[in-house]
Image (spheres, coloured by chain):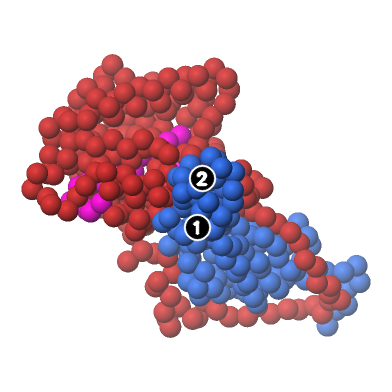
Chain colours: A blue, B red
Amino acid sequence: MHELSICQSIMQQLEQIAKDNHADQIDSIYLQIGPLSGVEPELLKQAFPLAAAGSCASQASVHITVPPIRVHCEICGEESPATANRLLCGACGDYHTRVISGDEMLLNSVELTKRSEEMSYV
Amino acid sequence: MCDTCGCNITASNQHLIKPGGKLHAVKQTTTAVTILQGLLSENDQTARHNRQHFDRHGVLAINLMSSPGSGKTSLLEATLDVISPDLRVAVIEGDLETENDAERIRRKGVTAIQITTGNACHLDAHMIHDALHSLPLEELDIVFIENVGNLVCPASFDLGQHLNVTLLSVTEGDDKPSKYPVMFRAADLVLITKTDLLHVLDDFDVQTAEKNLRNLASQVPLIALSSRQQHGISEWLDWLEHQQDEQLQRLKNGTTRQPTIQQDGQRLHADL
């Protein structure tokens, strides 16, 4: 869903990050995309080179971690794994739970190439 | 075809991928930088700005989402018949094409702005921002945003609203909350619509739909109603009145609110 427009949004962030860090090039980006985020990792990887074309991130490799879905139960206090459409507490079965992992849509970190103090010209 | 999902990347797009040239050779070091920003942070920034606009003028903003044809516009028509003009309401309509829905609202004597998105299958914060410039917010109590009919994409885009309402009509099947968890989790209220048709259907059970909703760890109210036959409408109006009271309280306290699921997500994950 909207992986290309999300890549365009990532690109805006990367351009700012590159500027803030005096970097020529973004080498890698690390994303966390949870199963409940509404974003499909494979489509995002396909869309990224298009959004990044001609930019500081045109050569960047895209690494996506998919965190597991986990919930915290407000009734018994336990944390347990869950699935996208069954988010009940694994311990007591109650539905008063909160998702603590699995709905992320985050740009975690980037690796970038900074210009150093010395410059040489060709 | 949606122009933002990436499904239209083809061989003819390849000319966009070309390496840039570098004129200087520089001594380089590679550094890792931790960011922890949400991927939609640009949309979210505009959404926060919209929310501030609404709050500054004391306006309650409610986003209606559902499949196409679930009865969003009909619900608004039935609602406006009761609450307007005692409550000052405006509606922002979102559709790919036509002004049909805005015209239906205008026939009720209520201001409606139609956003025609062209190919975009959801509204986003920028579109709402532009629409807000055409609304006299200082003269309004409630703005309803009727999102594009789509049970997938609208759920992920903060528009600056305070509340999300997801509609599910009885002809769509009671398993849809299980099939579309993101959309149903995004709701602060779920409405089962077109209950006037239940007697001709043998495959929709309101309690099953509610069970599927609860399985998503959703604690929000579920109201079954019929806009045509005025069943359940008073429960919906009570909920609206309660939300307005809460909005007035928040304005006194100088606080705001976002749709419940977004509050959770931000609290847990992103450093915005």
Residue designated by label 1: A82
Q: Is residue A37 above or below residue B86?
A: below
Q: Type of residue at label 2?
A: Thr
Q: Residue B164, percent across and down? A: 40, 40
**In the rendering, at what x and y percent does residue B240 appear?**
34, 26
Residue type marked 1: Ala
Q: Is residue B153 visible?
A: no
| Magenta stretch bounds | B159-174
Classify residue A100 as left or right of residue B147: right
- Where residue B230 is drawn, which disc sits there? none
The residue depicted at 56 percent of the width and 62 percent of the height is A68
Residue denoted by label 2: A97
Q: Secondary structure at mark 2?
A: strand
Which residue: 34% across, 50% down? B212
A49 or B269: nearer the viewer: B269
Task: Answer whether labels 1 and 2 touch (C-beta < 8 Å).
Answer: yes
Q: Is residue B5 left or right of residue B204?
A: right
User: Quadrant of the rendered structure where residue A11 is?
Assistant: bottom right
Describe residue B172's horizontal placement relative to residue B128 as left or right.
left
Tell me if residue B25 comes above or below residue B249 in the rendering: below
User: Do dots 1 and 2 share one subunit?
Assistant: yes
Q: Residue at x 46, y 45 (%)?
A: A94
